Image (tube, rainbow, N blue to C red):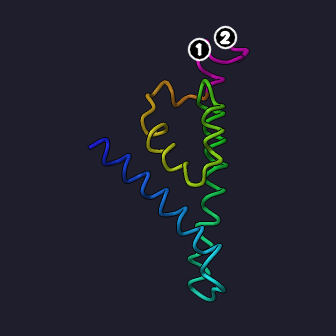
């Protein structure tokens, strides 16, 4: 079952990237609803990457590998399902406030 989730996440990422490339290179001029539907993925991709940057620098002990992966379009979907949803209660606290993990003055 775990592999099915990973495969479906990878398929979603590949389909979204394929759709964006198709709209950008082959679709031609779009009007009306087609234009709106084509603009949504172009807005969601960068917004998700910014969220992934924020999340990895706030909650990960070693954020740079995830920050580098954030430049891959729509990889924030994988980050959400594989990293964010699987965090324990202690890992949901920002890294600065964790005991022994940050530079808080309260310690």
- SS state under label 2: loop
Q: Residue at x 61, y 39 (%)?
A: 55
Which of the two labelled residues, at mark 1 and mark 2, occupies the earlier sequence position? 1
Asked whether, in this view, residue 73 is left or right of residue 82, the answer is: right
- Determine which of the numbered discs, if any, sits on residue 19 in the image: none
Residue tagged 1: 99
Q: Quadrant of residue 102?
A: top right
Per the image, is 75 magenta? no
The prevailing secondary structure element of the residues shown in magenta is loop
Residue at point 73%, 15% (across, down): 105
**Residue under the image location 59 percent in, 14 percent down:** 99
Residue 88 position in % (x across, y down): 43, 28
**Front residue (pair 77, 100):** 77
Q: Which residues are magenta?
A: 95-107
| Image vertical order of residue 72 relative to residue 33, above or below | above
Q: Residues within 10 Å of mark 1 (few under 14, many from 20)?
A: few
How many C-alpha atoms fall within 10 Å of the one at disc 2: few (<14), some, or many (≥20)?
few
Report the number of discs.
Answer: 2
> In the rendered image of this protein, does residue 42 appear above or below residue 73?
below
Please determine whether, in this image, residue 95 is positioned above or below residue 52: above
Location of residue 42 in the rendering, given as x and y in whole percent from the top left corner: 64, 66
Q: Which mark is residue 107?
A: 2
Q: Examine the structure image and report whether residue 102 is included in the region drawn in magenta.
A: yes
Please identify the quadrant where the N terminus is shown.
top left
Q: Position of residue 18 (x, y in %)?
A: 53, 65
Q: Residue furthest front?
A: 26
Q: Kindly indicate whether the residue at mark 2 contacts the one at mark 1 (C-beta within 8 angstroms).
A: yes
């Amino acid at each position: 079952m775990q592999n099915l989730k990973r495969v479906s996440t990878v398929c979603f990422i590949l389909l979204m990237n394929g759709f964006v490339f198709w709209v950008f290179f082959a679709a031609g001029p779009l009007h009306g609803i087609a234009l709106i539907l084509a603009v949504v993925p172009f807005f969601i991709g960068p917004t998700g990457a910014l969220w992934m940057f924020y999340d990895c620098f706030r909650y990960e002990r070693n954020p740079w590998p995830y920050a580098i992966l954030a430049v891959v379009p729509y990889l924030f979907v994988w980050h959400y399902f594989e990293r964010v949803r699987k965090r324990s209660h202690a890992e949901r606290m920002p890294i600065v406030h964790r005991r022994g993990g940050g530079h808080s003055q309260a310690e």
